[in-house]
Amino acid sequence: MATVQSIVQPNLFELEGYNTQITYSSTSIIGVPQLSYLNEGKTLNFRGDDIHIEQTKLGQMVTVDLSRSPASEILETLTLLIPIVNLPAASPERAVQTTAIFSQIVKGVKPQVQTYMTLCLAGTAKQVAF
């Protein structure tokens, strides 16, 4: 007789691709989501209300503002696509692949104001106790 295996959802994603590392946790020891973005030696950390989370048919979309100055001529955001991942409770870690989308809005009068760049990421999805 086959046994039913317990399935859990990951709450920590550790990802990297092309000189970029992104770590996202849907919760933390302080009870709020956290995202860390490392690119070319520059690290940006976000938590709580700095992170916008949407449920879509693509999966969960986690967005942060990379350019924080409202006076900046370029507004840049990072949207991380979080796929649905089932982890066996007995071994709550699995390799994953996903995509990050960078959006730039350049203030001014131009035909196309907003542009996108995608980045393929690979890493692990884990269920951890915070």
Image (tube, grey):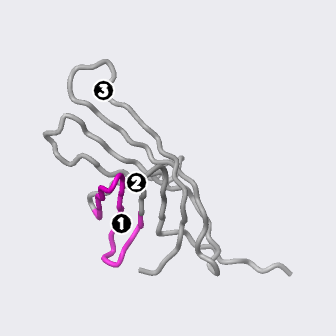
Determine whether 27 is above or below 99 in the image.
Answer: below
At x 49%, y 77%, the residue is 128
Distance from Cα at disc 3 to Cα at disc 2: 22 Å
Label 1 vs label 3, nearer the camera: 3
Q: Which residue is mark 3?
A: 113
Q: Secondary structure at mark 2?
A: strand
- Bin the neighbour count of mark 1 within 10 Å (Cα to Cα): few under 14, some 14-19, many 20 and up: many
Q: Is residue 100 left or right of residue 68?
A: right
Q: Are marks 2 and 1 in contact (CB under 8 Å)?
A: yes
Q: Which residue is mark 1?
A: 33
Amino acid carrying mark 1 in the image: Pro
Q: Position of residue 92 (x, y in %)?
A: 59, 75
Determine whether 6 is above or below 37 in the image.
Answer: below
Q: Position of residue 42 (x, y in %)?
A: 29, 55
Q: Residue furthest right?
A: 1
Q: Is residue 114 left or right of residue 122?
A: left
At x 28%, y 48%, the residue is 66
At x 29%, y 33%, the residue is 105
Amino acid carrying mark 2 in the image: Val
Q: Which residue is mark 2?
A: 62
Distance from Cα at disc 1 to Cα at disc 3: 30 Å
Say whether disc 3 or disc 2 marks the residue closer to the N-terminus. Answer: 2
Distance from Cα at disc 2 to Cα at disc 1: 10 Å
- Bin the neighbour count of mark 3 within 10 Å (Cα to Cα): few under 14, some 14-19, many 20 and up: few
Rendered-image quadrant of the N terminus:
bottom right
